[in-house]
Image (cartoon, coloured by chain):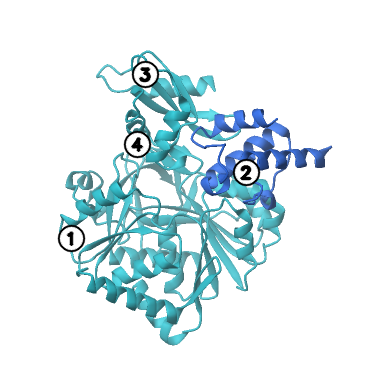
Chain colours: A blue, B cyan
């Protein structure tokens, strides 16, 4: 799953370094919204404003964990 | 009354009232005025002279407010640039403005990529700033008990020109560093102010509606008004926002750095008229050319472009700005925007001149020629596509080109799609045939 998420996010945000440990601080509003829209559409999950925290968007791994927890909620 | 005269007035009449909030920091009118006087004194001591330009970074904090007002208080011209502007760009602009002399009444020079390509310095008089502020105060009914949330960059008109009306009326400005942390936005709405207002580009409204409409609705009682502009907002979003905030005033405003705030329309009227930007505001007037072009006149318009009389003459004649916007006036006297002349691409509410992107891409070692065109993304809507002719022996590395463009331009100007071609299609007179690629791209995606 991590590789797939990396691939679709890199397609949408080609200039972002998804290996960064400081992803949230390196993203701007447009980047955050792009990630939410792409993941919501791909996994049919609802990521809402409360999920957009520096912790949930710190690294690619934390984004993957967020998606996994949302999928569990849906299950 | 100028912004600085208003702050001094409230420092005397309401000294403890909160003038500005940013993160954990807040400052009263009395302390704000004292800080402005101190900073102005330091600027004068460091050699800043009356009528001379002062180039500085628009940091997203109270320090910017102090510096901006102090420059005016010292009688100089404020030239705020983006807070992430490179030092070499700062130096280029500093050299440009310092080599020129200016009319006495110029207060601000705002740099904008606008719609004409190369970055231009727009000169604004004190009269333009004051009358633009009055347009907002009168037509949107700013009041002293209002807390105005600014989340956009403070060197842009949509944010900077809100500081003037809100502090001129004795209200409070709250500065946020963007909207990516939506929780911070909602935390501000919980602060002990009786009512709030903000400016949001349509893409941000879409984001709030899509990811937090219930949460937004829970603040309906304290949101006095929301203003949008800079890009078309869909009827569906106008309707949904009106239903989410049924008692708030919701404005779609027409304005720009060269023209100020010109017209506004409260779309929470049950009609949600798409493209409508309402009646001209207090100090502004509009005319439509026979070809459908919008002309703006009134004291809010710019004085001209810095050191560029030719470009100034192209759009400013007899006190009128001939914009590149197209529109018409309906039977109620309301202006409707129907489109734009030229090649400007609208990406999530941000206007992008494709030539800026092409210039940046051409400085990448692998790019021999390129054209930037709009493309439709299935999830993100309109995005940019770069069609590239590569230098001999090079392969297409989209990440490398994107990262390179990202070091030169804002993130919304980085193309999402990349395509390598053998040569570019040109018109009969050798110009890039943008229409060809636009049609081709929109058909493909």
Co-location on one chain, circles 2 and 4: yes
Out of B200 and B183, give the one closest to the viewer.
B183
Alpha carbon distance from label 1 to label 2: 46 Å
Subunit under mark 4: B
**Residue B354 location, x and y as percent?**
37, 33
Alpha carbon distance from label 1 to label 3: 45 Å
Q: Earlier in the sequence, mark 1 or mark 2?
A: 1
Q: Which residue is mark 2?
A: B236
Q: Earlier in the sequence, mark 4 or mark 3?
A: 4
Above or below, comparing residue B9 to residue B155 in the picture: below
Q: Point out which mark residue B102 bears.
A: 1
Residue in the image at 55% along x and 34% along y: B381
Mark 1: secondary structure: loop
Above or below, comparing residue B83 to residue B344 in the picture: below
Q: Choose mark 2 or mark 4, whichever is in front.
A: 4
Q: Is residue B281 visible?
A: no
Co-location on one chain, circles 1 and 3: yes
Q: Which residue is mark 4?
A: B356
Mark 4: secondary structure: helix
Co-location on one chain, circles 4 and 1: yes
Above or below, comparing residue B308 to residue B441 in the picture: below
Q: Are marks 1 and 2 in contact (CB under 8 Å)?
A: no
Disc 4 crowd, CA 10 A, few/some/many (<14, 14-19, 20+) = some
Res. B245 image quadrant = bottom right
Alpha carbon distance from label 4 to label 1: 28 Å
């Amino acid at each position: 799953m991590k590789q797939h998420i990396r691939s679709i996010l890199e397609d949408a945000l080609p200039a972002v370094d998804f290996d960064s440990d400081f992803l949230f601080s390196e993203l701007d509003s447009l980047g955050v919204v792009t990630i939410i829209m792409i993941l919501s559409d791909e996994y049919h999950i609802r990521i809402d404003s409360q999920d957009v925290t520096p912790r949930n968007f710190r690294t690619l791994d934390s984004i993957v964990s967020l998606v996994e927890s949302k999928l569990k909620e849906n299950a | 009354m100028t912004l600085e005269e208003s702050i001094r007035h409230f420092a005397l009449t309401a000294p403890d009232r909160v003038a500005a909030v940013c993160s954990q920091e807040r400052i009263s009118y009395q302390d704000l005025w004292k800080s402005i006087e101190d900073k102005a004194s330091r600027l004068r001591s460091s050699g800043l002279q009356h009528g001379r330009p002062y180039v500085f970074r628009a940091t997203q904090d109270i320090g910017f407010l102090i510096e901006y007002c102090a420059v005016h208080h010292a009688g100089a011209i404020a030239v705020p640039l983006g807070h992430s502007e490179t030092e070499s760009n700062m130096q280029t602009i500093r050299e440009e403005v310092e080599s020129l002399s200016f009319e006495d009444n110029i207060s601000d020079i705002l740099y904008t990529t606008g719609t004409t390509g190369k970055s231009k310095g727009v000169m604004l008089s004190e009269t333009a700033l004051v009358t633009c502020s009055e347009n907002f105060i009168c037509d949107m009914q700013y009041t002293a008990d209002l807390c105005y949330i600014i989340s956009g960059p403070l060197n842009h008109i949509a944010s900077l020109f809100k500081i003037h009306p809100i502090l001129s009326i004795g209200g409070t400005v709250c500065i946020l560093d963007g909207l990516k942390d939506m929780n911070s936005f909602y935390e501000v709405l919980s602060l002990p102010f009786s009512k709030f207002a903000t400016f949001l580009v349509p893409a941000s409204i879409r984001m709030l509606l899509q990811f937090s409409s219930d949460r937004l609705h829970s603040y309906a009682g304290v949101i006095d008004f929301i203003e949008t502009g800079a890009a078309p907002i869909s009827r569906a979003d106008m309707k949904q926002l009106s239903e989410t905030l049924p008692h708030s005033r919701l404005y779609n405003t027409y304005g720009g750095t060269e023209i100020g705030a010109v017209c506004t329309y409260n779309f929470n009227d049950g009609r949600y008229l798409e493209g409508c930007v309402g009646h001209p505001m207090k100090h502004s007037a509009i005319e439509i050319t026979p070809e459908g072009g919008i002309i703006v006149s009134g004291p809010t318009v710019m004085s001209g472009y810095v050191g560029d009389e030719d470009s100034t003459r192209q759009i400013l004649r007899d006190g009128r700005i001939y914009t590149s916007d197209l529109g018409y006036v309906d039977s109620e006297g309301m202006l409707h925007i129907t489109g734009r002349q030229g090649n400007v691409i609208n990406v999530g509410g941000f206007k992008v001149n494709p030539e800026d992107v092409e210039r940046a891409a051409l400085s990448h070692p692998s790019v021999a020629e390129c054209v930037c065109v709009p493309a439709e993304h299935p999830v993100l809507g309109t995005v940019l596509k770069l069609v590239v002719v590569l230098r001999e022996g090079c392969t297409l590395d989209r990440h490398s080109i994107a990262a390179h463009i990202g070091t030169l331009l804002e993130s919304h100007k980085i193309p999402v799609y990349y395509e390598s071609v053998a040569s570019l299609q040109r018109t009969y007179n050798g110009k890039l045939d943008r229409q060809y690629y636009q049609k081709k791209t929109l058909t493909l995606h």
